Image (cartoon, rainbow, N blue to C red):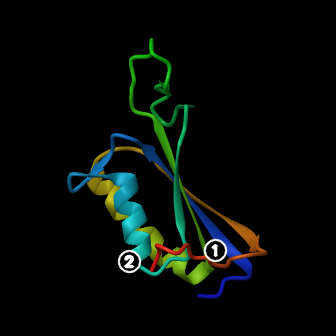
Amino acid sequence: MELYGKALNLRIQCGETDKYESQPLYEAIIYAARKEGMAGATAFRGVMSFGASHSIHTIKIFALGGDLPILIDITDNEERVKKFIPIVEEMMEQSGKGGMITTHEVEVHRYLPGKKHRNES
């Protein structure tokens, strides 16, 4: 797959404990992105957040909420991203939890596979 120049970045914010069909939501979204042929996806675990409910979620030991924030970052061409958004919306809807989906235009300067190691096939 070639990806260079103008593209769209999709960011999905959810909670670490959010589930989709008994699987962590962030994992389900990453696998769905791969199945849909997206250029790539990465999930990041945050250390602190709040959202629409204004509940604080943090890694600190004294905090009551243990649901750490997850940010999923996907960049691909505009057509693929816009086609993928309804899939993500449905998954988030089924999870029954909150979250946020945003997009912004980006410029891709490099998108190449890394070197394979001997034990990779």
Q: Which mark is residue 52?
A: none
Image position of 8 (left or right of 94): right
Q: Where is residue 22 in the image (x, y as percent from the top left)?
A: 21, 52
Instruction: Give 92 or 20, whichever is nearer the viewer.
Output: 20
Q: Quadrant of residue 29?
A: bottom left
Q: Where is residue 76 in the image (x, y as percent from the top left)?
A: 60, 76
Q: Name the residue under label 2.
A: 35
Query: What residue lies at 47% left-to-right and 69% top-to-bottom?
Result: 85
Is 64 situated above or below 84? above
Query: What residue lies at 46% left-to-right and 26% top-to-bottom?
Result: 55
Q: From the image, state whether disc 2 or disc 1 is nearer to you.
A: 1
Dot 2, how many residues are within 10 Å of its Cα: few (below 14), some (14-19), or many (20+)? few
Is 17 situated above or below 58? below
Q: Position of residue 118 (x, y in %)?
A: 52, 75
Image position of 107 (left or right of 30): right
Circle 2: element type? helix
Q: In which quarter of the image is residue 11?
A: bottom right
Q: Report the label total.
A: 2
Circle 1: element type? loop
Quarter in which the C terminus is drawn? bottom left
Quarter in which the N terminus is drawn? bottom right
> Mark 2 or mark 1, which has the lower sequence index?
2
Q: Mark 1 points at which residue?
A: 114
Three-letter amino acid code of the residue under disc 1: Gly
Instruction: Give 108 or 78, whichever is nearer the viewer.
Output: 108
